[in-house]
Image (cartoon, rainbow, N blue to C red):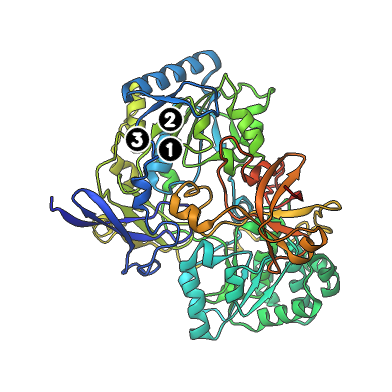
Amino acid sequence: MPQSYEVRGCCPLDCQDTCAWTASVENGRVIQVRGARDHPFTRGSLCAKVRDYQERTYAPDRILYPLRRTGAKGAGQFTPISWDEAIDLIATRVTEIIIRHGPEALMPHSFMGSMGVVQRRALMRLFHALGATRVHGSICGQAGNVLAAEGHPIGFDPEEFILSQLILVWGSNDLTTAHHHWHFIQEARHASGATIVSIDPVLTRTAKACDRHLAIHPGSDAVLAAGIAHVLLEESLADLGFARQIASDLNEYIRQVSEWPPARVAGVCGVAPDDIVWLAREFARARPAAIRSGIAPQQTIHGEAYVRGLSALAILGGHWQLPGGGLFIEAYPVFYDVRAARPDLIPGEPRSLDMARLGEILTDRTLWPPVKGLMIWGTNPAVVQPNAALVRQGLGRDDLFTVVLEHFFTDTARYADVILPSTTQLEHFDIQGSWGHHYISVNHPAIRPVGEAKSHGEVLRLLAKRLGLAQPALHESDETIASSALPLDVDRAALHDRGWLKTSPGRPRFEPEKRKLRLAGPIPERIASPASGMFRLLAPKARYFLNSSFANMARQRHAQGRPMLAMNAGDAGARGLVDEQEVFLKNANGTITASLHVTNDIRPGVVALPGKWWSVPGTIGAVGNVLTSSSWSPGGQPAFNDTFVEVEAV
């Protein structure tokens, strides 16, 4: 092999952009990762989080060998062991748990730390074959999943945004969380003269780049959607012909929104009545208009009401009839990654538990059988789950055997009994889809694994062999596992050579003869409001972290700075608080610390702590989900943004 070469790959992280990249290798070491210039979405640029991804692979604190816990859970005391010892220990404990409690006492817990088919799905084959507890739900975006399951379309090809004449960027900070999407929104300005409107409680980087910003009360989004619909109907601006074709309950929906005139909506949302009328008229005039929604507005107890309200607006305005129109929350290529998990291996009907309720599951003394064996990969639940303090309590159980596959000593890894070193994206083969566009990407390994790190496919094969499981699906290569998710008509040679292919499902199709959609649903009469002296706490994504990933990396931590709590200047002044002062955030669930950022970019009564920060041993730290309660929307979306705190000087 030559001393210098380049390898095509892709970013594995939980981001809608799913960038294609090229890794430059010299003398067996990756020296640079660059965005692929020929990829229609990536366009040669990577975000501030991953533009030096190779530093993650070579980080001095990376876990490179299997480890066994030697101290108390959470203390972070481990000793290196061999892979044979680790696999023997895991297999022995798994066998004991099955004999004593049955296979449902085993549970996998994973999420989108890597979107690759092998890294995300391969180990599910093992748990499926064993008959372990299944999992359902989602940590984020569950409200959208619920509406999509009803048949509501929640996405289209984002490259169509260039055809939109009005784009409502609703609760999404694209410049920070998915900046490649912003390319197409910007191009709509030039190509279609589009007006871009931000609807957000915070004047974000994206809101500042929009034509107008409506600073909504958090949690009142469904009410604003009803107010816009009210004006559309009152002024005969709605496409009722199209809506009647699609909706099963249009008359009921019309009755509901008739109760929400702009003046009433303004009292709940904090948006001026004239702005609501203006927005409704612009929404009707544009041919087409698009709603580009973020995930954050779903994360309240009214999550499904929010998504239903936006879907109803897109239908009522008739915007789905034109390319570039409709509701965009998520978009997927034709790709079958769930198939790679091989649910057909499941024997019988094991129970299914909600992954977003991990704290409750691990501490529920009435659950039978109790979860006795837990394997975690692709997520850091001690930081990202709701009620993180309860999650830590559950992870701290002496009778719980926990295996964590990781790159670093995350808060979660510190509770493991065994830690297995996982390969980074530069060290393994994988294929993945996207939840933000219509491209499939392939990731070729640029280097051999550092230390003794292994892909999750290799871990599957080692455990299956040691457990004596003979099903062929448990012994397939990583390439075979990954390829099982591909559509049959994909040109695999072209995919491997180019690094990406578009497999677009096309525009969403309505089939009213089979199923009409329900537009009417609960519209919150009132939104949850803080008690006297308390603030609603928002937890937006940080510019330099991706959820909790990179919160330990030196460059990203330096760029992000300290944990900063944004507070309206009027609120700070009324409490005698000043910029950069250290403050406590407190409620009945716990206390954390942050530095205060006094600003007029956030609504009064609201504070925001960007980033999923790791805890620092020996300090209180800034793990925001310590403060969240155990509450969910009706469909199971954790209500992260229905958290209320006191703020006091340290």
Task: State if disc 1 and disc 2 touch (CB < 8 Å).
Answer: yes
Please name whichever residue, 573 or 633, is drawn nearer the observer in this view of the structure.
573
Residue placed at 31% from the left, 69% from the top? 38
Q: Secondary structure at mark 3?
A: loop
Residue placed at 68% from the left, 77% from the top? 239
Please name whichever residue, 501 or 273, is drawn nearer the observer in this view of the structure.
273
Residue 243: quarter of image = bottom right
Residue 485 in view in this figure: no
Q: In the picture shown, does residue 19 fall above or below 467?
A: below
User: Which residue is denoted by mark 2 in the rendering?
Assistant: 419
How would you rate the neighbour count of disc 2 (Cα within 10 Å): few for under 14, some for 14-19, many for 20 or more? Answer: many
Q: Amino acid at mark 3?
A: Leu
Mark 1 or mark 2, which is nearer the start of the sequence?
1
Residue placed at 56% from the left, 82% from the top? 194
Task: State if disc 3 and disc 2 touch (CB < 8 Å).
Answer: no
Q: Amino acid at mark 1?
A: Glu
User: Which residue is denoted by mark 1 in the rendering?
Assistant: 406
Residue 144 in view in this figure: yes
